[in-house]
Amino acid sequence: MTGAVIDVRELSKRFGTRQVVEGLTLQVAKGEICGFLGANGSGKTTTIRMLCGLLVPDAGQGTCIGFDIIAQAALIRRHVGYMTQKFSLYEDLSVFENLDFVSRVYETPERKKVIVDIMERMGLVDRRDQLAGQLSGGWKQRLALAACVMHRPELLLLDEPTSGVDALARREFWDLIIDMAAEGLTVLVSTHYMDEAERCSRIVYLADGHIVVQGSAEEVTRQAGLVTFDGSGAGIDTVARVLRQAKGIEAAAVFGRSLHVAGTDRSAVTAALHATAGDLHWTEVEPRLEDAFIHMLSAKVGPP
């Protein structure tokens, strides 16, 4: 991929006897929002830390925002924004004081104006003097994002940034991300939320340190090869328990008054539905990204 903001090949990282990332090759284009999916321990955080210069890979090579990930790691750290899973700013400083501190670290020109501008964009002006430790999860998230992008990085690395915040805060956070991507910011974000993954222009699924599948949400869902049905009627809880034990059924989940069933073998799935006791009406539906994600988690898929 010519001119890729992230262009790395065959990255590997081991901690002790555990191989966390192995032979990972990834390219991310300018302005792209790339979503990292995978189970806990699949290598997402380790990959992000190698990309931003916080970890040195054991093997592999490549560039991030044009800098060599090994020889120029310090330069990468100054020119990317990295938002960790855990809130990492000073809780005993105010919103303004935290941003002022970060702007001094990055030696930001016109510091005061930049701070005011970013507070306005993130909706933090009214909380300027509030201690960071007194903010709710959603407002801490906005403050952390403001600190990450205040120095105008070319690349934003987000490691499960919306964990533990409510749905409205997540939606507003993603609106900010998409607006900045439209202005040219490149984003790599790890998430376990399927609605967030669906907002990414591309999804990369990791398992055991390998990229298993990548593409748009539609492409990833299609590659899973799932057959899915929704059932409605009386006794869906009982039917769900029976179907979870049936051959060919990978998932049988109750959503309110309907039962969502998934599997990869059409004949086995339909046979299980016909054999199941109960008087449910079944309709074949398009698989969801969540279906594909659970399928990959359940199958513990590895590299091709």
Image (spheres, grey):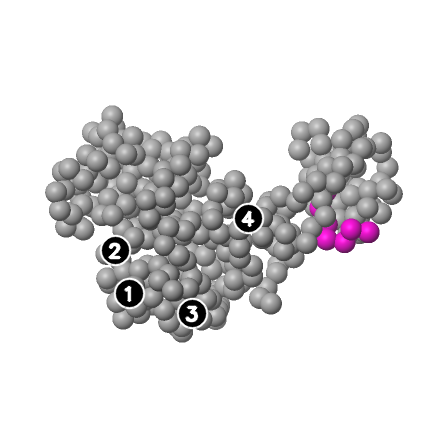
Disc 1 residue type (three-letter) = Phe
Mark 2 neighbour class, 10 Å CA radius: few under 14, some 14 to 19, many 20 or more: many
Q: Which residue is mark 2?
A: 79
State how far apart marks 3 and 1 are (Cα): 14 Å
User: What residue sits right under mark 1 in the picture?
Assistant: 67
Mark pair 3, 2: CA separation: 21 Å
Q: Amino acid at mark 3?
A: Arg
* Residue 110 percent coordinates (x, y): 12, 42
Name the outermost residue toward the top. Answer: 126
Q: Is residue 96 visible?
A: no
Q: Is residue 190 magenta?
A: no
Mark 1 or 2 closer to N-term? 1
Tell me, yes or no, whether the two marked residues, 4 and 2, touch with CB atoms within 8 Å. Answer: no
Residue carrying label 3: 9
Residue at image location 24% in from the left, 29% down from the top: 125
Tell whether label 3 touches label 4 (CB within 8 Å).
Answer: no
